Image: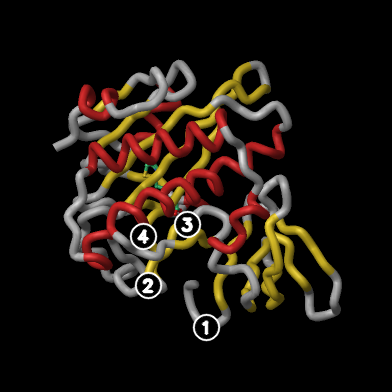
């Protein structure tokens, strides 16, 4: 069971932890109630979770958490936050359950060819400026069942490793890792591109109404995906409205 003081006691920074028995979306709640950097809103019972591109996010015996992050001075760097969160989740879960999770640009964590975690970054505006970023992280910790539309492409820590999760520990570790990456020791995506499952692969990009195949080659310093078009030209795509899939399936 989630316990706010237990999570707080494991944080390496002085952050507020709010455990919610049930909530529509931790991101919505954080946007309305979040105050300061590092605030964590967390539940095991999210009833109307939101995903990227207007999709919904299904949550069963899973962890839904939203961490308030200070916006980066250069707004384009805010795109880095979901990648850093994905990197943090990979590091924490790999060491906790001895798995080989990887980032799927721009905002998923995958394991065994299936999605284990999704990340949704949302900005809170004040006078037209971003005053706070809410980084929403949904980790399928102990989930065993998924709805028919996602069951072939979703997985959980438990299904991949047989390990039941200590959700308080995982939540604190992920928040700590994200804090380290954002504040103490920032890293650039190029440095962890080996952990990105798309790099070096043929991918299908859906950009507005355009759908094309190309090869993913790197992630730039703002978090954009560098791809090599079949013409040989290098192009950088931003995460906004883009969906990237492997040509033979989800990864
Ligand atoms: C995606 O893969 O499309 C992103 C999924 C993000 C889900 C998380 S769960 C915690 C936070 N609250 C939400 O409503 N969404 C994010």
User: Does 109 appear above or below 89?
Assistant: below
How much space separates mark 3 and mark 2, taking CA atoms? 13 Å
**Left or right position of 192 against 3:** right
Q: Earlier in the sequence, mark 4 or mark 3?
A: 3
Residue that mark 3 sits on: 108
| Tag 3–tag 2 contact (CB < 8 Å) | no
**Residue at image coords 50%, 34%:** 180
Q: Which mark is residue 112?
A: 2
Most extreme residue toward the left, as rendered? Answer: 1
Whether disc 3's CB lies below 8 Å from ligand 1 is answered yes
- What distance separates the C-alpha of mark 4 from that of mark 1? 19 Å
The 10 Å Cα crowd at callout 3, few under 14, some 14 to 19, many 20 or more, is many
Name the N-terminal-most of marks 3 and 1.
3
- Which numbered disc, 4 or 1, marks the residue that appears first in the sequence? 4
Name the residue that disc number 4 marks: 116
Answer whether labels 3 and 1 touch (C-beta < 8 Å). no
Q: Position of residue 95 (x, y in %)?
A: 34, 54
Badge 1 crowding class, 10 Å Cα cut-off, few under 14, some 14 to 19, many 20 or more, is few
Cβ atoms under marks 4 and 1 closer than 8 Å: no
Is disc 4 surrounded by few (<14), some (14 to 19) or many (20+) residues within 10 Å?
many
Which quarter of the figure has residue 130?
Answer: top right
Is disc 2 placed on a helix, strand or loop?
loop
- As measured in the structure, the alpha-carbon distance from the residue carrying label 3 to the one carrying label 1 is 17 Å
On screen, residue 202 versus residue 172, left or right, reads: right
Instruction: Calculate the distance from the C-alpha at mark 4 to the C-alpha at mark 2.
Output: 9 Å
Residue 165, image x, y percentages: 21, 50
Give the mark, 1 or 2, whose residue is nearer the N terminus.
Answer: 2
Between the C-alphas of marks 4 and 3, the distance is 8 Å
For mark 4, give the secondary structure.
Answer: strand
Nearest the viewer among 185 and 56 is 185
Quadrant (top left/top right/bottom left/bottom right) for the N terminus: top left
């Amino acid at each position: 069971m989630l316990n706010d003081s237990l999570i707080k006691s494991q944080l390496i920074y002085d952050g507020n932890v709010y455990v919610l028995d049930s909530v529509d979306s931790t991101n919505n709640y954080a946007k309305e109630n979040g105050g300061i950097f590092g605030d964590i809103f967390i539940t095991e019972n999210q009833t109307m979770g939101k995903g990227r591109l207007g999709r919904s996010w299904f949550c069963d015996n899973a962890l839904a958490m939203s961490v308030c992050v200070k916006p980066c001075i250069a707004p384009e760097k805010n795109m880095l936050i979901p990648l850093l969160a994905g990197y943090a989740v990979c590091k924490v879960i790999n060491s906790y359950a001895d798995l080989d999770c990887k980032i799927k640009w721009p905002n998923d964590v995958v394991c065994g060819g299936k999605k284990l975690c999704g990340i949704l970054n949302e900005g809170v505006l004040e006078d037209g400026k971003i005053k706070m970023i809410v980084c929403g992280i949904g980790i399928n910790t102990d989930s065993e069942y998924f709805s028919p539309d996602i069951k072939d492409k979703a997985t959980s820590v438990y299904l991949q490793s047989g390990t039941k999760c200590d959700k308080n520990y995982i939540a604190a570790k992920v928040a700590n890792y994200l804090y380290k990456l954002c504040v103490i020791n920032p890293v650039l995506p190029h440095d962890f591109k080996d952990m990105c499952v798309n790099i070096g692969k043929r991918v299908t990009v859906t950009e507005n109404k355009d759908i094309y195949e190309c090869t993913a080659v790197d992630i730039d310093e703002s978090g954009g995906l560098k791809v090599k078009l079949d013409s040989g030209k290098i192009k950088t795509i931003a995460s906004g409205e883009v969906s990237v899939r492997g040509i033979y399936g989800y990864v």
